[in-house]
Amino acid sequence: PHLQRAFQLHLALTRVQSERMQMTEALSRVAQSVIVLDRSGKVVFLNPAAEKIIAEKDGLELDRDMCLFASSSSENKTFRAALDAIFVESLEKLADPGGVLQISRPSGGRPLQILIFPFTEPDFNSYSSEPLAMIFLYDPESRLAPVEDVLSQTYGLTPAESHVAALLAGGISLKEAGDELGVSLNTVKTHLKRIFTKTDTNRQSELITLLNNGPGRFNHGPSGDGKIKL
């Protein structure tokens, strides 16, 4: 019986570790910035997209204990209140959990936008025995371009066409794309016509919608250690 229980425990731990690795891999590949915090505000998980924003220390920062805080003291109080509300045990107060906050940036850029809500999915409880909060972090100043090699594989684009498509999907104009590539506007327009044909689109807005909703928005390359912070 003791050996049986030990083996069952081993299988359960193996399953938990596998689920954790799968979730880490998935969240590390998405372009959206994702942060998971514990009750104290300490980072449990920080994907590469979020890590890049936090590293700029422009509105949100990490202290030496790896706790997330807003640069503005007044906004940090609001953020902490929203985070504390996530962990209130009252079911009545949890009826409408989470919220959306704006965090101003010392650089003068558009405020960061954060969506915070309880992270209570049972399959993800392997991250912590304590309740967790998840944050989706939006940077209005960022231009999230699709991964070029994925565009090439998906739509049969040449490297030059993939580069143009990625720039346009990231919010670059035709002229700006030409300047970045060092080619004329007419050359960019020629690439665009070929991209339209290969993606079965007719308008630039239609193309951008297609690209930004497709697999190119995911990082298909190695994700390293998943940027786990424990």
Image (spheres, rainbow, N blue to C red):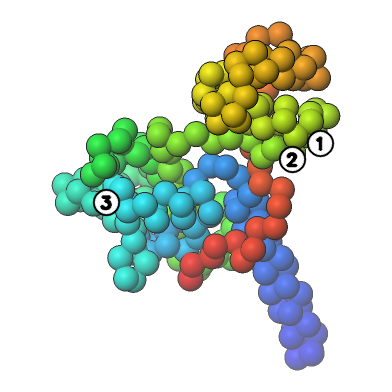
Please name the residue shown 53% across and 54% down the image. 47
Please name the residue shown 77% across and 17% down the image. 194
Q: Nearer the viewer, mark 3 or mark 2?
A: 2
Query: Which element carries disc 2, helix, strand or loop?
Result: helix
Instruction: Give the labeled residue for mark 1.
Output: 153
Relative placement, left or right, of 133 versus 18 is left
Residue 204 occupies quadrant: top right
Instruction: Give the labeled residue for mark 2.
Output: 149
Please give the label number shown on residue 70. 3
| Pick the front one: 225 or 84 | 225
> What amino acid is found at the position of numbered circle 2 in the picture?
Asp
Relative placement, left or right, of 199 versus 88 is right
> What amino acid is found at the position of numbered circle 1 in the picture?
Gln
Image x and y of residue 54, in percent: 39, 53
**Distance Cα–Cα, label 3 vs label 2:** 36 Å
Q: Residues within 10 Å of mark 3 (few under 14, many from 20)?
A: many
54, above or below 126, in the image: above
112, above or below 11, in the image: above
> What amino acid is found at the position of numbered circle 3 in the picture?
Ala
Relative placement, left or right, of 37 versus 147 is left
Q: Are marks 3 and 1 in contact (CB under 8 Å)?
A: no
Image x and y of residue 211, in percent: 66, 26
Image x and y of residue 13, in percent: 69, 74
Q: Are marks 2 and 1 in contact (CB under 8 Å)?
A: yes
- Which quadrant is the N terminus positioned in? bottom right
| Pick the front one: 119 or 33 | 33
